[in-house]
Amino acid sequence: MTTIDPDRLPKRQHYRVVPDRSALMIEVATSVGPVTFGAIGLEGFVRAAARGTRLDLAATPNAHLELQLRDLTSGNAAYDGELQRHIAVRRYPAAHVDLHHVHSVEDSSSDYRVAGDVMFRGITQRVEGFVTVHLPDAGLLRVSGTKSLDIRLFEVPPPTLFMLKIDPEVTVSLDLEARLGP
C-alpha cells in the first residue's frame, strides 16, 4: 500500500470571486422565443492548486458560490416580477453552489468535469457538468461553463406568464473571475 505524504501534495490557494467580473445567465425557452435573465455579482471562493496554466488535481479543488436571486433581471419588469414571485425570492433570497469533485477531460488542458451541490429554493440537488478553466496570470482564475437544468428538480413548476408557455428545461451559463486573496 502506498502512503501519500501530505507535505508533498500541492498547496491549494484561496481565490476570491470578483463580483463585478462574475455573472450568471439563465436562458428560458418560451412559446414566443427565448428570454434571458442575468445577474452580475456572484460571490464566493475557489480553493485550488495550480501547475502553470492548469489546475493540479492532486490537491482536490473546491468552491462555494452564492448569487442573490433578486439580482436576476431580464430587463422586462413584468418578466422579472413574475420570476421573483415564482421562485419565492423573499423566502429564498440566495442560491448556492458547493463544488466537490473535479476531473480532467482527456486531451484537454483547460476542460474539466465537475460535480457539486446546487441549493435553490431550499432544495439541494447534485449537479454535474463541464467547465473551462483558464489561469492566464499568476493569481488569476477564470471559469466558464454552460449547463441545461430542469427546474422541476427544485420543485419549481414551469411558470406561465400571460399567454406564454415556458419550457422547464433552462440553460444556465457561468462566467467567473477569481483572484488570489485572503
Image (spheres, rainbow, N blue to C red):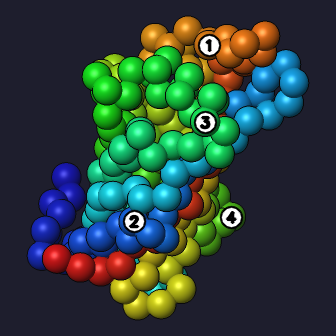
The amino acid type of the residue labelled 1 equals Pro
The residue that mark 2 highlights is 19
Q: In the current view of this chain or complex, which residue is farthest to the front?
A: 77
Report whether residue 163 is seen: yes
In three-dimensional space, the C-alpha distance between marks 4 and 1, rounded to whole angstroms, equals 41 Å
Residue 115 drawn at (x, y percent): 44, 41
In three-dimensional space, the C-alpha distance between marks 3 and 2, rounded to whole angstroms, equals 24 Å
Query: Which of disc 2 and disc 3 is earlier in sequence?
Result: 2
The amino acid type of the residue labelled 2 equals Pro
Vertical side of 116 occupied by 78: above or below: above
Query: Which of disc 1 and disc 3 is earlier in sequence?
Result: 3
The residue that mark 4 highlights is 107
Vertical side of 135 occupied by 142: above or below: above
Query: Which of disc 2 and disc 4 is earlier in sequence?
Result: 2
- Labels 3, 4: front one: 3
Mark 4 and mark 2 in contact? Answer it, CB < 8 Å.
Answer: no
- 152 or 37, which lies in front? 37
Query: Which of disc 1 and disc 4 is earlier in sequence?
Result: 4
Q: Is residue 40 left or right of residue 44?
A: right
Residue 56 drawn at (x, y percent): 39, 71
Judge the density around disc 3: few (<14), some (14-19), many (≥20) Cα neighbours within 10 Å.
Answer: few
Judge the density around disc 2: few (<14), some (14-19), many (≥20) Cα neighbours within 10 Å.
Answer: some
Which dot marks residue 77?
3
Query: Which of disc 4 and disc 3 is earlier in sequence?
Result: 3
* Residue at x 16% of width, y 76% of height: 182
The residue that mark 1 highlights is 159
